[in-house]
Image (cartoon, grey):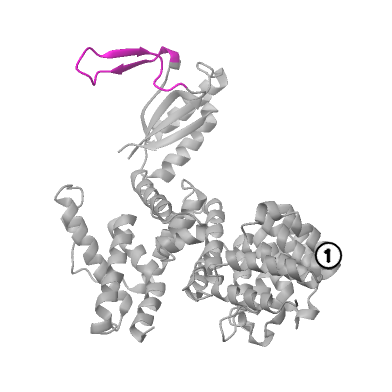
């Protein structure tokens, strides 16, 4: 990748949500904002290689996108006179970027509105806030691109027709609106943490960073909300291990084999502080707080052998009570293997096959347990299934090596 | 901005005196808040007539509702509200008052 292409990719990740948010506020229309932002980035792709990257790429893009939006409104207002000419001045200076930061919060509350289906909220947030393309989102959800495109188009049409407001909810409505936002942010974080796609970096730091940044913002608004704190802690404790998680050759490194000295100590400390803060309230924890506590146990161990696995299993027992998803049951079984041995875990995991046979992590966990009990042939088959389903390049590399190291 | 709020029911004329009183109280709040446009209860779907005058001949009248279903619209409100959040909040209060599920749909 050339320097300019790299700069464009970086600017896209950094500026996309700001551009969409500022245009949405200015023009009151998500569709116009999205289209104009996309056109502005396309223009940058055309022009920057020849003209060079402008000194303030964000301002350049906002200005370019504003022009595209005004052009579209002018074209449409020949047919439809609803838009006022007064709104459309090329000369209006772009918003200072600091002010627009909060615009992104508005954008996310609009994208996560409860009148939209959950899958729609996630798709819309990834498109509008995360800047993922429709094909990328479609791949993430294992649906056809056309279906995903329609889902996003319908959502934008509903937001406009039903007048879903573009604002941060009032204090009284805020707690109820936050939990939907948290699920969406967690999904965005996971897309960054375990990015999908053959040509995608295994970790998209800009997505994890964006999810963390927005979660911090929500925490500043709702400091008493345990699940906000829990999700932030969970993200920080996961993000802390980011650089230790992929080898120089682009292969995933399992938690057991990671160089713990490479973990980000500041993030670990901040995550631990949040977990302790929640424990001190003695209030019953929700799923994010429990997941954060599990990660706190892992990040407290000086090396893998020091991990307090019975504590991890106890926390998973707690988690199973609030979240009955088979994925939680799978992760609990992986922890059980460390306490009661791989045979016990394998028996549990085999019972989850019906629900999880399309999930790569199920096959990867099974492959590892089969390897440990010496069932190499079955392990190889399970690794094959996991590799087939895995979409993260580093994970595919890791799983392939493990498979090729099998005896026999 | 106006919203049509349809009351979903599987029976007609099924409201209790308590529900009627709660609806009256809610309607007074709607008026006081400047959200009232119109509201009304509807008679049974079997009282409906479907008319089709699209063809060249005489209009065709069909006895009964255009769609046979277990549930039907038993009444409606039209709210005036600045945005969907306000409309949804009013609709939640309306749902409580009439003790029925509601559908909120914006006018064009």
Left or right relative to B7: residue A408: right
Chain where mark 1 sits:
A
Q: Quadrant of residue A273?
A: bottom right
Q: Quadrant of residue A261?
A: bottom right
Residue at 48% from the left image edge and 32% from the top image edge: B102
Q: Is residue B54 magenta?
A: yes
Return the x and y of residue A205 as percentages of the image width and height: 51, 75
Is residue A111 among what the camera can see?
yes
Residue with the mark numbered 1: A343
In-front residue for pair A371/A344: A371
Q: Is residue A364 above or below residue B102?
A: below
Return the x and y of residue A373 as percentages of the image width and height: 82, 70
Is residue A277 among what the camera can see?
no
Q: Is residue A91 magenta?
A: no
Left or right relative to A77: residue A168: right
The C terminus of chain A lies in which quarter of the figure?
A: bottom right
Residue at 61% from the left image edge and 68% from the top image edge: A387
Return the x and y of residue A2 as percentages of the image width and height: 36, 85
Q: Which residues are magenta?
A: B46-68
Q: Is residue A154 above or below residue A70?
A: above
In-front residue for pair A390/A330: A390
């Amino acid at each position: 990748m050339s320097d300019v292409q790299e700069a464009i990719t970086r600017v896209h990740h950094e500026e996309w949500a700001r551009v969409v948010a500022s245009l949405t506020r200015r023009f009151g229309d998500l569709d116009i904002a999205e289209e104009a932002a996309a056109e502005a980035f396309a223009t940058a792709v055309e022009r920057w290689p020849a003209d060079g990257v402008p000194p303030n790429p964000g301002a350049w893009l906002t200005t370019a996108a504003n022009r595209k939006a005004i052009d579209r409104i002018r074209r449409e207002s020949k047919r439809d006179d609803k838009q006022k000419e007064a709104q459309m001045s090329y000369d209006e200076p772009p918003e200072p970027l600091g002010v627009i930061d909060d615009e992104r919060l508005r954008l996310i509350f609009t994208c996560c509105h409860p009148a939209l289906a959950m899958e729609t909220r996630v798709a819309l947030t990834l498109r509008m806030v995360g800047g993922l393309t429709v094909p990328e989102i479609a791949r993430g959800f294992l649906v056809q691109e056309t279906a995903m495109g329609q889902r996003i188009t319908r959502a934008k049409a509903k937001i406009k027709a039903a007048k879903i407001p573009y604002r941060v909810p009032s204090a009284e409505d805020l707690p109820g609106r936050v939990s939907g936002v948290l699920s969406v942010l967690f999904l965005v974080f996971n897309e960054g943490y375990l990015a999908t796609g053959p040509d995608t970096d295994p970790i998209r730091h800009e997505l994890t960073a964006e999810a963390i940044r927005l979660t911090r913002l929500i925490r500043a608004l709702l400091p008493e909300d345990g699940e906000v704190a829990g999700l932030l802690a969970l993200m920080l404790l996961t993000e802390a291990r980011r650089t230790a998680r992929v080898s120089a050759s682009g292969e995933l490194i399992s938690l057991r084999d990671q160089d713990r000295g490479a973990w980000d100590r500041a993030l670990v400390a901040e995550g631990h502080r949040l977990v302790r803060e929640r424990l001190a309230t003695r209030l019953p924890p929700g799923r994010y707080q429990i997941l954060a506590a599990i990660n706190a146990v892992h990040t407290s161990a000086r090396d893998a052998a020091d991990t307090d696995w019975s504590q991890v299993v106890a926390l998973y027992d707690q988690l199973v009570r609030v979240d009955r998803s088979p994925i939680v049951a799978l992760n609990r079984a992986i922890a059980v293997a460390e306490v009661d041995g791989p045979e016990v875990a394998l028996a549990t995991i085999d019972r989850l096959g019906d629900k999880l046979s399309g999930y790569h992590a199920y096959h990867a966990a099974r492959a590892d347990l089969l390897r440990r009990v010496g069932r190499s042939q079955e392990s190889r088959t399970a690794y094959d299934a996991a590799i087939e389903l895995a979409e993260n390049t580093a994970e595919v590399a890791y799983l392939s090596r493990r498979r090729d190291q099998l005896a026999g | 901005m106006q919203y049509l709020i349809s009351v979903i029911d599987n029976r007609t004329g099924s409201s209790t005196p308590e529900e009627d009183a709660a609806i009256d109280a809610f309607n007074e709040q709607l008026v006081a808040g400047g959200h009232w446009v119109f509201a009304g209860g509807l008679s049974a779907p079997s009282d409906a007539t479907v008319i089709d005058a699209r063809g060249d001949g005489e209009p065709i009248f069909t006895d009964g509702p255009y769609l046979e279903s277990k549930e039907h619209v038993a009444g409606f409100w039209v709210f005036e509200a600045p945005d969907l959040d306000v409309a949804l909040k009013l609709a939640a209060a309306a749902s409580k008052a009439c003790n029925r599920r509601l559908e909120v749909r914006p006018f064009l």
